[in-house]
Image: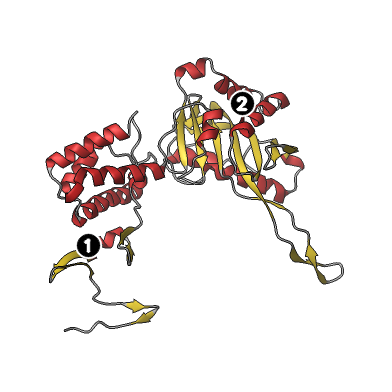
Amino acid sequence: MNQKELNEIRRRIRPERNSIRNIYGCYVNGNREIISYLDESLGLLTKEEAEKYLALLKKTLSGTLGRNLLDLSFATKQVMDSEEHRLLSQLRKTELKDAALRDAFYKAIIESLNMEDRNYLILMAFDAYDVPRKGRSGDIEDSGEVFKYILCCVCPVKSGRAELGYEPEDRRFHSATAGQIVCPPELGFLFPAFDERSANIYNALFYTKNTMDIHQEFIDSVFRTRVPMSAGQQRETFGSILSETLEKDCRFDVIQGVHEQLSERISLHKESRDPEPLIVSPEELGDILENSGASPEEAELLCGRCREQFEGGEALRPANLIDGKRLEICTPEVKISLDPKFGYLVQTRVIDGRKYILVSADSGVEVNGIGVTIEEE
């Protein structure tokens, strides 16, 4: 799915736009026991309750493609005949109305998911979207395509503190009872994927709140498919590859150059408003390294190591490889953080045998919020 397709489905998750009739789910305690089941008609809920349920489900379509939102692909063999794909397909086909299928799905999640003894809520909903299209005259027409999909999310539940609450009847404040608060989803998914504005049963879109912990155990149980390397793993791996490739030649200016070139690509892609995620190949990374001052041999070595470490056609997104919003320079005692576009203000020097990091500071210097001047020698 690209950003445009994702946004189109996100706009559906509103009370006045979707065709969701019921919200299903179950409440699970830290001992992996189901405390209660949820089967609520969206039309019978108060407006506030309906909006809150939909907001939780919509959260599974938030974040960045390739970071919080990962494309999961099923093998052809799985789609043709596999327990995991059959269960997802039947849930979709029955519009989640079959209680036995829902129970089987809950069981698969509960038995595998590690929530560190926390209580959590599993939420599910089915929606059918009549996908519109623009006619030759520019008017919106019925395309005849109906995208039927399920949304699922897992939300941690924590105990709320007792607070003072105002009672209008006696015009006094009283201690309000502490309750169980449903937190934003930690993970979830959309099935099937909405590719080229149509259902793609070979793919699902998986959501993870934490890009460092994508709950591999959940994916193994529900999807049983290969998982793309997480954003955090991609960054760590790329950093290790750079360090191992350059070794003693891992100079400040080279790493700074790599960061600046990747940051520029991220910025230009954002300005272009291209809905497709920005991807770089191992060959392009090799060119970037060489353009940053490394030797052709080091660039070729980096390219080969990237192909080896990011095997299986791993999609390399610059936004995963670096922090495009921040350039951070650290020593054991000092940390410098700045916008990458001002990286040229930082230089390295060796003065009287000592190594220094120099930051240009011609004006606007503050110490603890107080403007100061730097005297010229």
Q: Say which amino acid is labelled 2.
A: Arg
Residue at figure coordinates x 29%, y 39% from the top left: 280
**209 vs 332: above or below:** above
Q: Secondary structure at mark 2?
A: helix
Question: Which secondary structure, mark 1?
Answer: helix
Reply above or below: 359 against 286. below
Q: For the point 35% across and 52% down, which residue is it?
A: 323
Q: Residue furthest right?
A: 170
Q: Nearer the viewer, residue 60 or 7?
A: 60
Which numbered marker is on residue 344?
1
Q: Counting other residues with Cα less than 10 Å from the Cα at mark 2, is it few (<14), some (14-19), or many (20 or more)?
A: many
**Residue 354 is at least partly visible in this image:** yes
Residue 197 at least partly seen = no
Q: Residues within 10 Å of mark 1 (few under 14, many from 20)?
A: few
**Residue 83 position in % (x across, y down):** 57, 19
Q: Which residue is mark 2?
A: 92
Compare residues 266 and 268 and report the one nearer the observer: 266
Question: Type of residue at label 1?
Answer: Tyr
Which label's residue is closer to the chain start, 1 or 2? Answer: 2
Q: Residue placed at 25% from the left, 53% from the top? A: 260
